[in-house]
Image: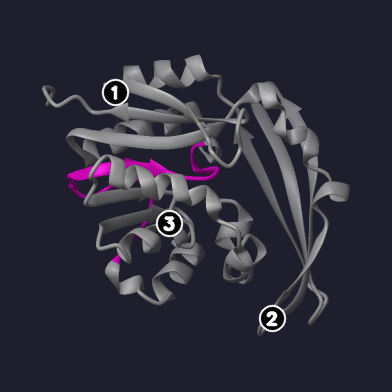
Amino acid sequence: MADECFRHPRLAAVYDALDPDRGDLDAYVRMTEEFGARRVLDIGCGTGVFALLLARRGIEVVGVDPAAASVAVARAKPGGERVRWIHGDATSLPPLRVDMATMTANAAQEITDPQAWRGTLGGAYEALRPGGVLVFETRDPAARAWEEWNREDSHAVTEIPGVGAVETWVRLVDVSGPLVSFRWTYVFAADGEVLTSDSTLRFREREEVEADLAARGFVVEEVRGAPDRPGREFVFLARRPADRP
């Protein structure tokens, strides 16, 4: 189940405006060039920012996401017709043979259920051609990112054309082992509506992720740091072996 910030039409419509700096995607664009990817599966595509970046470069992209409202926003964007959008998840994809599969931002951590996580990795494996690569990021638990998730550090008021001012902040709700829960609050000044979105992320250790990938048949080729968050994230590069079915 996707979080309310992705599922609610009003929140999905302002999602990009509230998080306009997507410099984190630059590294993924460079990796499509590094691996010569011409066909890409974007798992957890959200409002389609990354998928459309690739489509504008002539790459064939399939974007999949469980939040219908976010997929609708993505489809309606300029160039949206260049991408094949799927409302769903990686466990129920049509037959594909892509060069690269990605999970950007928090997409991998949003999948908190172990069975769903295994299913996602399995779906990515099946969608990749032999020799294709899966690339995704996840926060290093040792960095304890959740300690910064509070109103004081996150409060903002964003003026959005056609919408008006939207006040936002985040509050940490609970930390239970690898699961970290938090709540975003949104206040729309135009009519005073207050909406909230509860989220839970799973913070996986590097060794756990590597073991999960190996169990699904992947070979972990490299674990990099995220250029925009040095020392705070793992970026996994895992390949479907060319000599396996």
Residues 30 and 78: in front is: 30
The mark tally for this picture is 3
> Mark 1, residues whose alpha carbon is within 10 Å: few (<14), some, or many (≥20)?
many
Q: Is residue 115 above or below residue 192?
A: above
Q: Which segment is the magenta one?
A: 83-108
The amino acid sitting under disc 1 is: Phe
The amino acid sitting under disc 3 is: Phe
Residue 8 locus on image (x, y percent): 60, 64
Judged left or right of residue 154, residue 118 is left
Q: Is residue 22 above or below residue 202?
A: below
Q: Do the numbered discs 3 and 2 sit on residues whose CB atoms are within 8 Å?
A: no
Tag 2 residue: 163
Residue 218 numbered tag: 1
Residue 175 locus on image (x, y percent): 74, 28
**Residue 187: quarter of image:** bottom right
Q: Would you say residue 241 sits in the magenta stretch?
A: no
Secondary element at tag 2: loop
For the point 23% across and 44% down, the residue is 36
Secondary element at tag 1: loop
The amino acid sitting under disc 2 is: Val
Tag 3 residue: 50
Residues 51 and 63: in front is: 51
